[in-house]
Image (cartoon, rainbow, N blue to C red):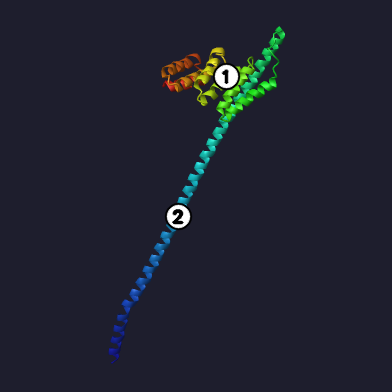
Amino acid sequence: MARTRQWIAVLALAASLPAHAGLFDDTEARKELMRMREDYNARLQALEASSRAQLDLANQIEALKAEVARLRGDVELLGHTMESVQKRQKDFYVDLDERLRRLETGAGPAGPVDPAAESADYESALNLLKGGKYGDAAAAFDAFVAKYPSSSFLPSAHFWAGSAALQAKDINRASEHFNAVVNQWPDDPRAPDALLGVANCQRALGERKLEQKTLQGVIERYPDSAAAKSAKQRLGG
């Protein structure tokens, strides 16, 4: 009887073992699933953070590029302004020296000229050009040339008048001004660029052979100038 009870207890224990094992396996599977889900979420969050960081970096790079471009433009404008200031100072002293020589020799201009008004008129025309008002600028420089025929600003005035007229698509008028600089003041610092301006006018008129000849003339007459470098590039040399 006692042995029978023992066998019943053993059988009951054996019958209960699979149920406990199944319960243990299901719990472990859930734990593993939760661990995998947490790992996946962590990786997803890391990927999203990395993507945001890359996007922020790309935006910063683009912002820096824009800032560099803006600063480069400011530097170029400053350089142009400094060049204009230096040129005006040089022109002023040359004009002053010329006026003194005229006084010493007893020769004088046809009428009194106010240097301040002369400089102001020149500056006004130049500001129109800088502001993109090319037609108005060309007219203002024309007026300056007519009003101050003995001005030391004349080479620059003709050059800028040609540049303004070229931008305004008045090609013939631009060519006249550029040629005036080349023919009357061939040693002026503006002369190389003026001759290059003549070539630009010829290109605008479709005169390609004349343009190439003029470009070659820039190289031969002003070999060390920036205009000569541009001419070489355009000729493919």
| Mark 2 residue type | Ala
Name the residue that disc number 2 marks.
46
- Marked residue nearer the N-terminal end (2 or 1): 2
Quadrant assignment, res 211: top left
* Closer-to-camera residue (233/167): 167
What SS does tag 2 mark? helix
Instruction: Determine the residue positioned at 62% across, 17% down.
Output: 146
Instruction: Determine the residue positioned at 36% across, 71% down.
Output: 26
Any part of residue 225 in sight = no
Q: Which mark is residue 233?
A: none
Determine the CA span between mark 2 and mark 1. 66 Å
Q: Is residue 120 left or right of residue 40?
A: right
Q: Is residue 25 left or right of residue 185?
A: left
Residue 10: % across, % down:
30, 83
Identity of the residue furthest to the top in this view = 105
For the residue carrying disc 1, how many other residues have a C-alpha within 10 Å: few (<14), some (14-19), or many (20+)?
many
Name the residue that disc number 1 marks.
158
Identity of the residue furthest to the bottom in this view = 1
Q: Is residue 105 left or right of residue 82?
A: right
* Closer-to-camera residue (44/198): 198
189 is higher (above) or lower (below) than 17:
above
| Mark 1 residue type | His
Residue 212: % across, % down:
43, 18
Residue 52: % across, % down:
47, 51
For the residue carrying disc 2, how many other residues have a C-alpha within 10 Å: few (<14), some (14-19), or many (20+)?
few
Any part of residue 118 in sight = yes
* Quarter occupied by the C terminus: top left
Quadrant assignment, res 177: top right
Residue 179: % across, % down:
52, 16
Quadrant assignment, res 121: top right
